[in-house]
Image (spheres, helix red, strand yellow):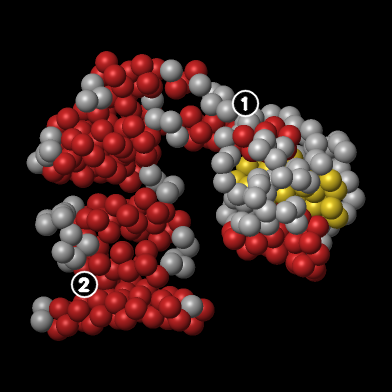
Amino acid sequence: MLTTLLIAPLLQAAPQAERPFPLMLGDRAPAIQVAEWVQGTPVTRFEPGKLYVVEFWATWCGPCKVAIPHLNELSKKYAGQVQFVGVSVWEQKDQPYSVPQFVKKMGDKMTYTVAADLNAPSEDDGPMATSWMKASGRDGIPAAFIVNGEGRIAWIGNPLSGIDEALSQIVAGKWDLDAVAKKYALDMRLQGVLPKLREEITRFKKSKDFAGALKTIETAIAQDPGLESYFGTTKYFLLLDAQRTADAATYGQRLVTQVIADNAMALNSLAWTIVEPGGKVKQGDYALAVKAAERAVQLLEGKDASTMDTLGLALFKSGQVARAIEVQEKAVALAKEEVAKDPKLADLETDLRGRLDEFKNAKKNL
């Protein structure tokens, strides 16, 4: 078991581990060292004042084939402002080198500069895979790095998620690199801690030792406060499992107003778990669910059907039937719009309409 003696060394080391990987956000970008420039103007150095996106992909990678056209559109959008460089890495060693053929086949979907880390099968990683991917702890592709005008890495991530907003802010000069780098370092640092803690908490829960699970979480948070945003919701429901209702009510307020106050997904998850039909919470804190759901809806600007549905159900269970109907009608309207864009979501609209009918029937019987 992860007693205080076991958890403490693990977490006491974490605050000092600000560099869990050799290459982190804020660092100077490694050199561009490729075996072959396949297409476009070679980049031999990062010029001061110029922005770059260095993206890693492979000919065999399905998600890369999805990301490439998107990156191509971004390269057109920021033409003259951002230089895009796609670097092929980890090509399959049992297949002939085919990067030039792949790029040619992509045609106008891949018009930015392209290079190859290695231009022949090899048992070793190329210099780019080593100095960029491995050094930053990245073991999956596609992966992209944004290099700012100072030659520092300003963003690292999957080009299918988050790069648009980051690039927009960086180009506009609104990117707080120091703040982002600090959060990134915390996230990377915690990657080694979270799985071990989750495993131990799960073990306690399976044996219904809720006190032990709570002790594990509270000890971890005491050692590293950054862990509360990861385990706060779990702590809340463990307090309920331990029949510490008053403590759960108090902590629930802290959770919604401080710990996850800006995390719409976490807020919605908390609220839904409290009100979920047939869920494990038989008589939940519906006022807390309303508060969490209202905040989630606010963060998402009232544009998400599922979150609006959570609020509707929370209001209904808290006795606010008239307002629940009003909110649920908005949820159904949003679901209808979502179905128009993606017919596969038809069941969502059906479920939300069913809940709206339930609310209306209940109002008739009041």
Label 2 and label 1: CA atoms lie apart by 56 Å
Left or right of 357? Residue 255 is right
Query: Which residue was labeled with disc 2?
Result: 321
Q: Position of residue 20 (x, y in %)?
A: 54, 26
Q: What residue type is labelled 2?
A: Val
Q: Is residue 182 above or below residue 108?
A: above
Q: Quadrant of the N terminus?
A: top left
Where disc 2 sits, the SS reads helix
**In percent of the image, x 24 and y 36: which residue is there?**
201
Q: Is residue 327 above or below residue 91?
A: below
Left or right of 171? Residue 297 is left
Left or right of 353? Residue 167 is right
Q: What residue type is labelled 1?
A: Pro
Residue 30 sits in quarter: top right
Q: In this view, does 94 lie above or below 44?
A: below
Q: Where is residue 223 in the image (x, y as percent from the top left)?
A: 35, 22
Residues packed near mark 1 inside 10 Å, few (<14), some (14 to 19) or many (20 plus): few
